[in-house]
Image (tube, helix red, strand yellow):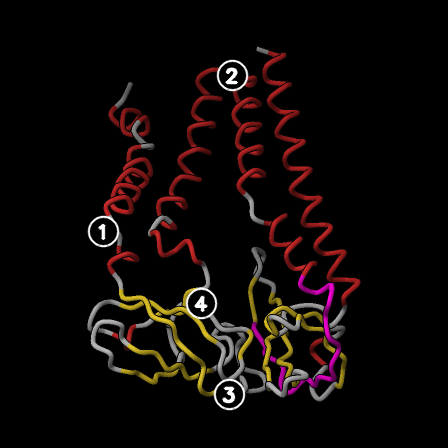
Amino acid sequence: MTAVGDLLELWWVVPAAWVVVGHVLSWLGLSPAQRAVWATARIVRVEQPAHGASKQPGIPVTLAFRDPSTGREFTLPNTGRHGVAVKEAWVGRELEVRYPRGRPDRFRVVFDPDEKKGRTGPHCALVPLLVGLVIHTAVARGFPWALLGFGVLLVVAAAVSPDIRLARARDALLASAVAVPARVVSVTRDVYTDGEGAEIVNHAPVITFTTREGTDVTVLCLDGIPDPRRSLGRALTLHYAPSDPAVYTPDPAADRRSNERAIGAIVLLAVAGVAGIVAGAVTL
C-alpha cells in the first residue's frame, strides 16, 4: 500500500479524536461552553426588520443581563454575530446568553439547553465518524455489511431524534391556542444560488400581534403565509399558545399536518433501518 493509501486508512483519527477529547473536556467541566459565563437576559427593546432586508439577523432586539460574578448589568443590542437569531420577540421575554469571562460584548444567544454541557461539537463530529466507519466497513467487507451498518445508523438516528417529542409538545401547546388579529409589517428578502447558478429568492413576512394580556409580539414567520412576497400590510388571524407566544401558527390545520409528516418521517426512518438490518443479516 502506498503512503497515500496509508494516510487514507487513518481518516478516522481526526473525528475520533474530536469526539474523545470533546467528551473528556465536557466530563471534566472544561469545555468552552462550560467555562463561559451564562446569564439570563431580558428583552428590553424590540425593533422591526426593515422591509426588504435579510432575515438572517432575525429580529433586532436589545437585551439586558447581569453578570453573575460581578453583579454589573449590561444592556446591549443583538445586532451582528450574537448566536442564534431571535425570531419571536417581545419586551420582557427571557433568553439565555453566554460569553467569555470579562467579554459581555461577545455574548451569544443560546436556545439549545444541551449546549451548556459542551457536547454539541463532539456530537457533530460523531456523525461523520459513524458514517465513515460504515462506508469503510462496506468497502472492506461487502454489501451486506453496508446494509447492516446503515440500518443501525437509521435506527439510532430515529431513536435519538427529538422531532416526535417536539411535534407532540407543539400540538399540545396549540391545542388551547388563542386567535388574535395580526398584521404583516415588513417582508424580508434573501437571494440564494442553487447548484446550477440560478437565483432563488426567499421572502419571510414579519408579523406583529398583541396577546390577550396586552403584550406586543413581533415574529419572523418562515412559513404558512400564502404569497409572502406580496403580503406587506396584510391583515390576518394568528393562533398562539397562551403559555408561550413564541409558539404560533397562521394555519392550525396545516401546522398539525406538518407535525404529522415529521412524526411519519421518523417512523419511516426507523422502519427503513430495521429493514436494512434484516436484509443485511439475511445476505451475510
Residue at 28%, 56% in the rendered image: 34
Give the image location of residue 103, x and y in percent: 23, 73
Distance between mark 2 and mark 4 Cα atoms:
43 Å
Label 2 environment density (alpha carbons within 10 Å; few <14, some 14–19, many ≥20): few
Q: Magenta includes 174?
A: yes
Give the image location of residue 107, x and y in percent: 32, 72
User: What is the span of residues highlighted in magenta in the rendered image?
Assistant: 173-190
Q: Nearer the viewer, residue 56 or 240?
A: 240
Q: Quadrant of the C terminus?
A: top right
Question: Which residue position holds label 1?
Answer: 30
- Report how many numbered discs are placed on residues in the image: 4
Q: Are marks 3 and 2 in contact (CB under 8 Å)?
A: no
Label 4 environment density (alpha carbons within 10 Å; few <14, some 14–19, many ≥20): some
Per the image, label 1 sits on a secondary structure element best described as loop
Question: Which residue position holds label 2?
Answer: 142
Label 1 environment density (alpha carbons within 10 Å; few <14, some 14–19, many ≥20): some
Farthest residue toward the right? 253
Question: Which residue position holds label 3?
Answer: 47
Amino acid type assigned to the residue bearing label 2 in the image? Gly
The mark closer to the camera, 2 or 1, is: 1
Per the image, label 3 sits on a secondary structure element best described as loop
Q: Quadrant of the N terminus?
A: top left
Amino acid type assigned to the residue bearing label 1 in the image? Leu
Amino acid type assigned to the residue bearing label 4 in the image? Val
Tell me the number on the disc at residue 84.
4
